[in-house]
Amino acid sequence: MTDPGATTTDIAAADLGAEQSYRLLTGLVVPRPIAWVTTLSATQSVNLAPFSHFTFVSPKPPMLAISVGRKGDTYKDTATNILRTEEFVVHIADSSLVGPLHDSAEEHPPDVSEADLLGLETVPSLHVKVPRLKIAPVAMECRLRHCIEFGETRSRLLVGEVLVFRLRPDLLKDGKVDTRSLDPIGRIAGPNYARLGEIITQRAIQQTSKS
């Protein structure tokens, strides 16, 4: 309950249903990077879906994590496919791809390829059987290493080891990614996305190792 005299609006998490909590979290944890993930269905169709519950969890070996939820009692095709094949490809889309990225979230039967429906060409990967999107500026081929379930909704955190980074050549400068050239898309609440705004540079902080 909100106290009219309070300086904050306090919401007890225990009073919220999963959907209410989801709306708050997706409006507060912003902007979120988006993993655009290809997997292979049991019929070898290329499943394609975006996930903004996405981060990296280890630099050596490099590991990425995506959180995949359920609709009712059924997990999304991406989780089913990854657990069966233990392979997937994570793409980073630029702003020119926001339309097909958003449309790829539409639900289809497992044997329907979102990549084909959207006219997105796929090409073979180097180390996994799952194809990658030719048009994406970044593709990271991954092998599943961990699957952990969280909460009452039993969302699955899928952690994959990156086997190879495939980047558009102009993105690398002195071993670092030129973020402006990448022009990544960020997810905010609802069907809303964001591009990079002003980049604020601060002095570099020297890190010292502690043993």
Image (spheres, helix red, strand yellow):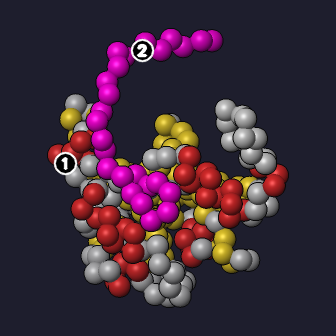
Q: Position of residue 169 (x, y in %)?
A: 19, 48
* Residue at 32% across, 80% down: 118
Q: Relative to residue 94, is residue 156 drawn left or right? A: right
Q: Position of residue 76 (x, y in %)?
A: 60, 74
Q: Label 1 crowding class (10 Å Cα cut-off): few <14, some 14-19, many 20+?
A: few
> Residue lying furthest left in this view?
170
* Residue at 61% across, 58% down: 23
Q: Label 2 crowding class (10 Å Cα cut-off): few <14, some 14-19, many 20+?
A: few
**Callout 2 amino acid:** Ile
Q: Quadrant of residue 173?
A: top left
Separation of residues labelled 2 and 1 (CA atoms): 29 Å
Q: Quadrant of the C terminus?
A: top right
Q: Nearer the viewer, residue 160 or 97?
A: 97
Q: Which residues are magenta?
A: 186-211
Location of residue 100 with respect to 27 vertically, above or below = below
Q: Which mark is residue 205?
A: 2
Q: Position of residue 46 (x, y in %)?
A: 42, 78
Residue 133 lies in the magenta-colored region: no
Q: Which mark is residue 169?
A: 1
Q: Position of residue 116 (x, y in %)?
A: 34, 83
- The secondary structure that most of the magenta stretch takes on is loop
